[in-house]
Amino acid sequence: MSEEEKREYAWQHAIIVDGFDPNLYRKDACGAWMRWDMYGQQDNIFGWQVDHIFPISRGGDDHPENLRALQHQNNASKGDDYPSYEALITAQDNTNVEQRRSLIVNEIKRQQLEEIYSNNA
């Protein structure tokens, strides 16, 4: 899968918010706003990156089920943590705000990844 394909796949599986153009705005799993055209921009509050949910350092790869879009600060704070991780940014109305929270990858996704990476979990 090319970098562009990973980016597109991750974006298409991010959260669509009613009333907002899904080609431009979506939310990540932590509730933070992202803007399509801010991909890779770590100096912008709406910047985002492709996250490997099951970290590459633990044997994860570019399997589509292992990819998701995360606001860049949430991706950095998650790092190689799995299944629990820390999020720094969430949304309040139409903007992103700092709110440190401990999160865990949802059970359905964990089961999918366990099947894919059963030798690495």
Image (spheres, rainbow, N blue to C red):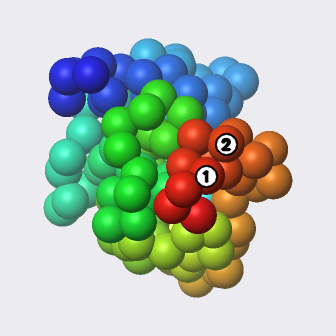
In the picture provided, is 117 more to the left or to the right than 4?
right
Q: Amino acid at mark 2?
A: Glu
> In the drawing, what numbered circle is on residue 4?
none
Vertical placement of 110 versus 120: above or below? above
In the picture provided, is 57 more to the left or to the right than 118?
left
In the picture provided, is 86 more to the left or to the right than 58?
right
User: Is 9 in front, or is 116?
Assistant: 116
Do the CB atoms of the residues marked 2 and 1 lie less than 8 Å apart?
Answer: yes
- Expressed as whole percent of the image width and height from the top left, the position of residue 38 reads 25, 40
User: Is 72 in front, or is 118?
Assistant: 118
Residue 28 seen in the current view: no
Residue at 18 percent of width and 50 percent of height: 41
Which residue in the protein does label 1 denote?
Answer: 118
- Expressed as whole percent of the image width and height from the top left, the position of residue 121 reads 58, 64
Dot 1: element: loop
Crowding around mark 1 (Cα neighbors within 10 Å: few <14, some 14 to 19, many 20+) is few
Residue 69, by quadrant, is: top left
- Expressed as whole percent of the image width and height from the top left, the position of residue 56 reads 34, 57
Residue at 44 percent of width and 17 percent of height: 23
Dot 2: element: helix
- Expressed as whole percent of the image width and height from the top left, the position of residue 64 reads 47, 29
Q: Amino acid at mark 1?
A: Ser
Crowding around mark 2 (Cα neighbors within 10 Å: few <14, some 14 to 19, many 20+) is few
Vertical placement of 79 versus 29: above or below? below
